Image (cartoon, rainbow, N blue to C red):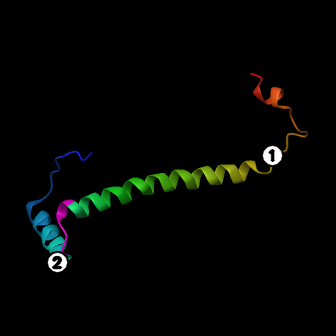
């Protein structure tokens, strides 16, 4: 479902952006949606990169033995 949002920007900047989008046979609305998707996924990629970094640091941790399923589920 698409939702409307309101943004505030300099009038000249909006005009330039519309002109650039038009030259690419696109619209400012479509270009913003593409940017928003890219921005949102970049956040996820950063989180994944941080997760991998932490897991790599923990890779050298040795518990000294294997645990049973019951032992791992104890609290």
Q: CA distance from mark 1 to mark 2?
A: 56 Å
Chief secondary structure of the magenta span? loop
The image quarter containing residue 56 is bottom right
Q: In front here: 11 or 6?
A: 6
Quadrant of residue 12 within the rendered picture: bottom left
In the foreground, 33 or 51: 33
Which callout, 1 or 2, points at the residue further toward the start of the chain? Answer: 2
Tag 1 residue = 61
Residue occupied by mark 2: 23
* Quadrant placement of the N terminus: top left
Q: Secondary structure at mark 2?
A: helix
| Magenta span | 25-29
Residue 66 place in picture, x, y as percent: 88, 38
Q: Residue at x 85, y 44 (%)?
A: 62
Q: Label 2: how many residues lie within 10 Å, few (<14), some (14-19) or many (20+)?
A: few
Horizontal and vertical percent position of residue 48: 56, 53
Residue in view at x 68 percent, y 50 percent: 55
Q: How many numbered circles are shown?
A: 2
**Residues at circles 1 and 2 in contact by the CB criterion of under 8 Å:** no
Q: Is residue 59 left or right of residue 63?
A: left
Residue 59: x, y in percent?
76, 51
Relative to 44, 6 lies left or right: left
Compared across the picture, whether 7 is left or right of 70 comes to left
- Furthest residue in direction front, as rendered: 1
Q: Is residue 34 left or right of residue 58?
A: left
Q: Residue at x 58, y 52 (%)?
A: 50
Q: Local crowd at mark 1 within 10 Å, few (<14), some, or many (≥20)?
A: few
On whether residue 40 falls in the magenta region, the answer is no
Give the quadrant of the C terminus. Answer: top right
Which numbered dot is residue 32?
Answer: none
């Amino acid at each position: 479902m698409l939702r409307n949002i309101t943004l505030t920007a300099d009038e000249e900047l909006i005009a330039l952006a519309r002109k650039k989008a038009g030259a690419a046979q696109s619209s400012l609305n479509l270009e913003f949606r593409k940017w928003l998707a890219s921005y949102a996924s970049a956040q996820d990629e950063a989180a994944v990169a941080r997760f991998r970094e932490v897991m790599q640091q923990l890779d050298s941790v040795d518990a000294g033995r294997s645990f049973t399923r019951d032992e791992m589920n104890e609290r």
